[in-house]
Image (cartoon, rainbow, N blue to C red):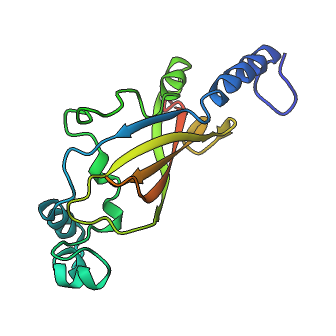
């Protein structure tokens, strides 16, 4: 029997309710720290800036960076690099000392229920202080929210929002990032 205004049976609605309760149990789950492979350095800043076409002199000239409050003799990194310092390498591994748990532990639960596709939907970053050459950046992540089931142009699924707080070696928060994905079952492409 189908329930009014849905394509689901009463049993399917009950299963979905149990599944969504399981998903909500992950809200607040924390992971980290995720350490950086390298301290903030001019070579990586230069590569980033060349790729992005960013010619801000504070990223190249320590005298300009000092006028912005950086310690003498160092440059600042583009704030948009905040996450780059803590990303895994090509081997998919974080450096020794990092948390080895999945930063989004809810994802395997989606996979088990057939929500195998994923797309990043948006990213919001907040910059709180300069990241300077020599800083050692780390991040800690929290599952901030999991939406109810949504029907989208891609398929039926759930939005998951992860909040990552980035700190330097002094424990100072340098910024935050909200990263949202859609974990979904794609519509059939068969004609």
Task: Out of 165 and 145, give the one closest to the viewer.
Answer: 165
> With 42 as the anchor, is 22 left or right in this view?
right
Location of residue 117 in the rendering, given as x and y in whole percent from the top left corner: 46, 33
Task: Out of 102 and 90, give the one closest to the viewer.
Answer: 102
* Residue at x 17%, y 69% (from the top left corner): 50
Q: Is residue 5 above or below residue 10?
A: below
Task: Out of 31 and 4, give the one closest to the viewer.
Answer: 31
Q: Pick out the residue farthest to the right.
A: 4
Q: Pick out the residue farthest to the front.
A: 170
* Residue at x 45%, y 34% (from the top left corner): 31
Is residue 173 visible to us here?
Answer: yes
> With 38 as the anchor, is 87 left or right in this view?
right
* Residue at x 30%, y 42% (from the top left corner): 35
- The quadrant the N terminus occupies is top right
Q: Is residue 112 above or below residue 82?
A: above
Is residue 56 visible to us here?
Answer: no
Q: Pick out the residue farthest to the left.
A: 43
> With 15 as the anchor, is 39 left or right in this view?
left
Location of residue 131 in the rendering, given as x and y in whole percent from the top left corner: 31, 64
Location of residue 108 in the rendering, given as x and y in whole percent from the top left corner: 48, 23
Number of numbered discs present?
A: 0
Location of residue 77 in the rendering, given as x and y in whole percent from the top left corner: 26, 67
State the image quarter where residue 187 is shown.
Answer: top right
State the image quarter where residue 148 is shown.
Answer: top right
Q: Is residue 8 above or below residue 27?
A: above
Q: Is residue 170 above or below residue 2?
A: below
* Residue at x 20%, y 53% (from the top left corner): 39
């Amino acid at each position: 029997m189908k329930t009014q205004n849905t394509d689901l049976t009463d049993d399917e609605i009950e299963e979905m309710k149990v599944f969504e309760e399981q998903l909500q149990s992950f809200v607040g789950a924390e992971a980290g720290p995720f350490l950086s492979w390298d301290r903030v350095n001019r070579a990586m800043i230069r590569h980033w800036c060349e790729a992005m076409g960013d010619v801000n002199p504070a990223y190249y000239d320590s005298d300009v960076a000092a006028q912005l409050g950086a310690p003498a003799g160092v440059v600042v990194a583009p704030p948009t690099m905040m996450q780059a310092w803590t990303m895994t390498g090509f081997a998919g591994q974080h450096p020794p000392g990092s948390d080895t748990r999945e930063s989004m532990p809810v994802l395997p639960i989606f996979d088990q229920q057939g929500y195998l596709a994923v797309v990043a939907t948006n990213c919001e970053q907040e910059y709180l202080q300069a990241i300077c050459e020599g800083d050692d950046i780390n991040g800690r992540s929290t599952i901030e929210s999991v939406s109810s089931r949504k029907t989208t142009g891609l398929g039926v699924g759930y939005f998951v929002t992860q909040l990552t707080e980035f700190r330097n070696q002094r424990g100072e928060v340098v910024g935050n990032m909200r990263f949202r994905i859609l974990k979904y079952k794609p519509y059939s492409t068969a004609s």
